[in-house]
Image (cartoon, helix red, strand yellow):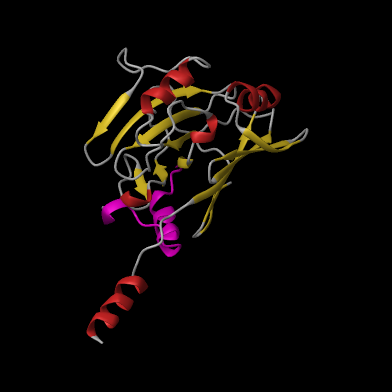
């Protein structure tokens, strides 16, 4: 009986990982950007009309809304298999210029996050990252990388001057600050647990993005997670 009770306790307390199911962004250079994701990066198009395009990003969806009157931009990341960083980087570099920081076109995160990443800009000016999380993303048996190897949307920024209010709201959804850290007003708060491999990057305005000279701005964002809808509109 004891073994049965202990097993039930373990199963009932197992934590469900956070998933970013879909992000909706406002962009200009709409036609050029849609063609970029469709033709240059070869992502699967789920819907494409005059005002909106939807792409399949592994288990997630990227939704682009046409807005030629404003110059919104964002930072987001795509998870790739843990063992495919250099294959993915070569694949990406053959299609788009990689961004650099201190003359380097990749970064190895080896402190709290264990990962390799590289960056590029799309035609709408979004700062996009491919990240291979060595501890939380699965490996692939594929030899060559393709768009089909992208696993999911890994990160999306939410930049605001109301950080503590957003921290509280996301905690109510079951999205905590990583490692239960004390929220910071001056840097990025990784909203989500480390093992999730998916984060809402909650941070202040005017913070420079690495591998870019752009600083964070408030842009309309809809973030659909399995815990609820997070918005910055």
Picture layout, residue 216 above or below residue 231: above
What percent of the width, then of the height, locates residue 58? 53, 41
Residue 182 horizontal/vertical position (percent): 26, 53
Q: Is residue 168 above or below residue 79?
A: below
Q: Quadrant of residue 72?
A: top right
Report the front residue among 214 and 177: 177
Residue at figure coordinates x 39%, y 55% from the top left: 167
State yes or no: residue 170 in magenta: yes
Residue 168 seen from this side: yes
Magenta extent: 157-180
Instruction: Give 109 or 44, whichever is nearer the viewer.
Output: 44
Q: Is residue 212 visible?
A: no
Horizontally, is 39 left or right of 190 in the view? Answer: right
The single residue placed furthest to the bottom in the displayed view is 1
Residue drawn where x is 51% and y is 16% of the image? 96
* Horizontal arrangement in the rendering, residue 19 relative to residue 63 (left or right): left
Q: Is residue 121 above or below residue 16?
A: above
Asked whether 37 falls inside the magenta stretch, the response is: no
Quadrant of the frame with the N terminus: bottom left
Which residue is located at x 53 percent, y 16 percent?
A: 95
| Front-lying residue, 142 or 61 | 142
Q: Position of residue 150 (x, y in %)?
A: 49, 36
Quadrant of residue 54 within the rendered picture: top right
């Amino acid at each position: 009986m004891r073994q049965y009770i202990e097993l039930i306790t373990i199963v009932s307390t197992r934590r469900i990982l956070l998933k970013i199911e879909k992000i909706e962004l406002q962009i200009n250079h709409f036609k050029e950007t849609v063609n970029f994701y469709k033709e240059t990066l070869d992502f699967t198009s789920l819907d494409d009309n005059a005002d909106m395009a939807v792409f399949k990003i592994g288990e997630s969806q990227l939704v682009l809304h046409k807005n030629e009157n404003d110059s919104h931009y964002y930072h987001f990341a795509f998870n790739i298999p843990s063992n495919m960083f250099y294959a993915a980087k070569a694949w990406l570099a053959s299609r788009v210029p990689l961004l650099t920081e201190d003359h380097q076109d990749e970064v190895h995160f080896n402190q709290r996050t264990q990962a390799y990443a590289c960056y590029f800009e799309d035609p709408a000016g979004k700062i996009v990252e491919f990240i291979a999380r060595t501890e939380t993303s699965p490996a692939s048996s594929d030899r060559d990388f393709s768009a089909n190897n992208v696993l999911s949307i890994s990160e999306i920024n939410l930049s605001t001057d109301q950080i503590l209010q957003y921290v509280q709201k996301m905690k109510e959804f079951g999205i905590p600050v990583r490692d239960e850290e004390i929220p910071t007003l001056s840097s990025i708060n990784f909203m989500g647990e480390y093992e999730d491999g998916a984060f809402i990057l909650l941070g202040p305005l005017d913070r420079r993005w690495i591998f870019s000279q752009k600083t964070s701005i408030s842009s309309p964002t809809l973030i659909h997670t399995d815990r609820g809808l997070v918005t910055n509109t």
